[in-house]
Image (cartoon, rainbow, N blue to C red):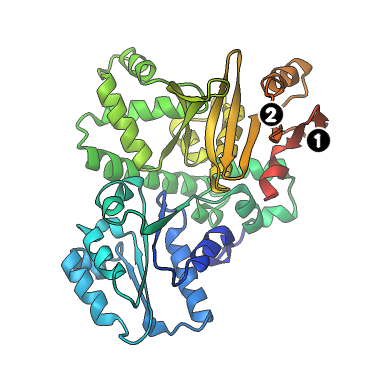
C-alpha cells in the first residue's frame, strides 16, 4: 500500500458536525482516544474555515503537544496570549488541541467563551477532562463530539485494498492491523504496526491511568486489562473480575477493581455496555459487557490464539452503533439476551450479531430472542456469512455485517 496523506481520509461525519456548529454560541468539545485523528480533524476544519472565507489571522490554532507551546500550559498565560492574537472587530476561531495538558484550562476556556467575537473548539484525549470542572463551569454551554479511530467504511475507502480484495480480506486487515489512521501508512509492516500500537497502549496506561490514579501495583492493573480484553462481549461483574485476578495469586479488592475500571473507561480504552431488562423496563446493575476501542489492541495484549472472532465482530458493530449516534444497551430477557438495543430519539433498533448462522441450530438460537419481542421496531441479524447472507425471518432482517458497515 502506498503512502497516504491522512487528510485524504474523509471523516465527513465529524467535519460536518463542526461545520454545522460554526458561529453558534456554544463551545465545541472533541473527545476521543489518543491517535484517533482529532488533530487532523481540527486541521481539516481550519482549512474548511479558510475555504469559506475566514482570514488566516482570525484562526488561532494551538497544539499543546508541541513543545513550542510549553509556556502556554498555564491558563493565565494561555488566555493572555490568545487575547493578544485576536482580531478585535471580527469573529475569531480558537482551536485548542489536546487542551488537557493545560492546568485549569477550563478557566481560560470559560473566559474566552463569554467574548462576543470568540468561537471556541477544544480537543482532549480522555473522558475525564470533561468530567470535572469544565462540565460544571460550562453546563449547558457546550456540545461534545466523541471521535473514534477509523470506521470499517473509512478504512475501506482509504485503503487501496478495496480495489482488489474481497470484503472479508479487508475486514481481516481492519481488525488485525488496527483502525488507527496511521497504520494505513504502514500496512503490511507488522513489526512497525506492533511498535506503534505498543506505543499508544503504553502511553495511555502510564499517563491516563497509572499517572492519574496513582496506581502503585501496575502488574495487577495490567492483569485486569488483559482479563477484560480477553472477555469482551461477555457479562462481567466487579466481583467476578476480582475473583479471577485473585485466583492467579495477585491481591485486589472490589473497590480497587471499580477504581481501575473507571480509569480505563475515562481513558476511552474500553467501553461499558449496561444491561436493560426489556420486560421490566429497568437497568440492571450487574453483568455489564465491555468492549475495546480497537480490536488490534486486544490482539496485541491477549494474542491471537483462538481469536474469538465472534466477539471481535460484536465489538466492531458496537463501535459502529455509537459512531452512528445511538445509545446502546444489552437487552436482557427472562430466557435469552439481545446483543444490542440501539436507541435514538426517534425509536429503537435491535441487533443480534453472530459470526455465522449457516448451522440451523445456531440460526435458531440467534433468532429466538428477537422473536420474543412484541413491538414493531426494526430487528437485525448481522453475520459474516457470504452464502445465504440476506434473508427475512418473520420481519427479522438478516444482513451481511460488512455490507451493513459500509451502508450508512
In the picture of the structure, the residue carrying the numbered disc 2 is: 375
In the rendered image, residue 241, in percent from the top left (x then y), is placed at: 37, 20
The earlier-in-sequence mark between 1 and 2 is: 2
In the rendered image, residue 329, in percent from the top left (x then y), is placed at: 52, 32
Q: Select label 1 or label 2 by which is in front.
A: 2
In the picture of the structure, the residue carrying the numbered disc 1 is: 390
Q: Name which quarter of the figure residue 378 lies in.
A: top right
Q: Mark 2, residues whose alpha carbon is within 10 Å: few (<14), some, or many (≥20)?
A: few
Q: Nearer the viewer, residue 122 or 396?
A: 396
Residue 282 in view in this figure: yes
Element type at mark 1: loop
Above or below for 159 versus 48: above
Residue at 62% x, 58% y: name it.
158
Q: Nearer the viewer, residue 385 or 5?
A: 385
Residue at 70% x, 43% y: name it.
404
Cα distance in 3D space between marks 1 and 2: 22 Å
Amino acid at each position: 500500500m502506498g503512502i497516504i496523506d491522512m487528510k485524504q481520509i474523509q471523516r465527513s461525519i465529524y467535519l460536518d458536525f463542526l461545520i454545522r456548529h460554526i458561529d453558534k454560541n456554544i463551545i465545541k468539545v472533541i473527545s476521543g482516544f489518543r491517535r484517533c485523528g482529532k488533530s487532523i480533524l481540527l486541521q481539516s476544519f481550519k482549512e474548511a474555515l479558510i475555504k469559506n472565507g475566514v482570514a488566516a489571522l482570525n484562526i488561532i490554532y494551538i497544539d499543546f503537544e508541541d513543545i513550542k507551546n510549553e509556556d502556554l500550559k498555564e491558563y493565565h498565560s494561555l488566555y493572555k496570549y490568545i487575547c493578544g492574537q485576536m482580531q478585535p472587530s471580527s469573529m475569531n476561531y480558537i482551536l485548542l488541541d489536546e487542551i488537557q495538558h493545560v492546568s485549569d484550562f477550563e478557566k481560560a476556556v470559560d473566559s474566552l467563551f463569554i467574548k462576543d467575537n470568540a468561537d471556541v473548539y477544544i480537543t482532549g484525549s480522555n473522558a475525564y477532562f470533561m468530567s470535572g470542572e469544565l462540565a460544571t463551569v460550562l453546563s449547558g454551554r457546550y456540545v461534545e463530539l466523541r471521535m473514534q479511530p477509523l470506521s470499517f467504511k473509512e478504512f475501506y475507502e482509504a485503503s487501496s485494498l478495496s480495489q482488489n480484495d474481497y470484503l472479508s480480506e479487508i475486514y481481516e486487515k481492519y481488525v488485525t492491523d488496527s483502525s488507527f489512521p496511521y497504520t494505513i501508512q504502514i500496512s503490511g509492516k507488522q513489526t512497525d504496526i506492533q511498535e506503534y500500537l505498543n506505543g499508544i497502549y503504553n502511553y495511555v496506561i502510564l499517563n491516563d491511568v497509572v499517572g492519574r490514579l496513582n496506581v502503585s501495583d501496575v502488574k495487577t492493573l495490567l492483569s485486569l486489562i488483559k482479563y477484560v480484553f480477553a472477555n469482551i462481549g461477555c457479562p462481567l461483574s466487579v466481583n467476578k473480575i476480582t475473583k479471577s485476578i485473585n485466583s492467579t495469586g495477585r491481591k485486589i479488592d472490589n473497590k480497587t477493581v471499580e477504581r481501575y475500571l473507571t480509569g480505563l473507561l475515562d481513558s476511552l480504552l474500553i467501553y461499558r455496555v449496561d444491561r436493560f431488562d426489556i420486560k421490566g423496563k429497568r437497568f440492571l446493575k450487574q453483568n455489564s459487557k465491555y468492549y475495546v476501542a480497537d480490536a488490534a489492541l486486544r490482539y496485541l495484549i491477549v494474542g491471537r490464539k483462538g481469536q474469538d472472532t465472534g466477539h471481535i465482530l460484536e465489538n466492531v458493530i458496537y463501535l459502529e452503533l455509537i459512531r452512528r449516534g445511538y445509545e446502546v444497551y444489552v437487552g436482557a430477557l427472562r430466557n435469552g439476551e439481545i446483543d444490542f438495543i440501539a436507541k435514538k430519539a426517534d425509536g429503537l433498533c435491535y441487533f443480534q450479531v453472530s459470526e455465522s448462522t449457516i448451522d440451523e441450530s445456531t440460526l435458531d438460537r440467534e433468532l429466538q430472542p428477537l422473536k420474543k419481542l412484541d413491538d414493531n421496531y426494526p430487528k437485525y441479524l448481522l453475520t459474516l456469512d457470504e452464502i445465504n447472507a440476506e434473508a427475512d425471518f418473520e420481519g427479522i432482517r438478516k444482513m451481511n455485517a460488512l455490507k451493513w458497515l459500509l451502508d450508512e
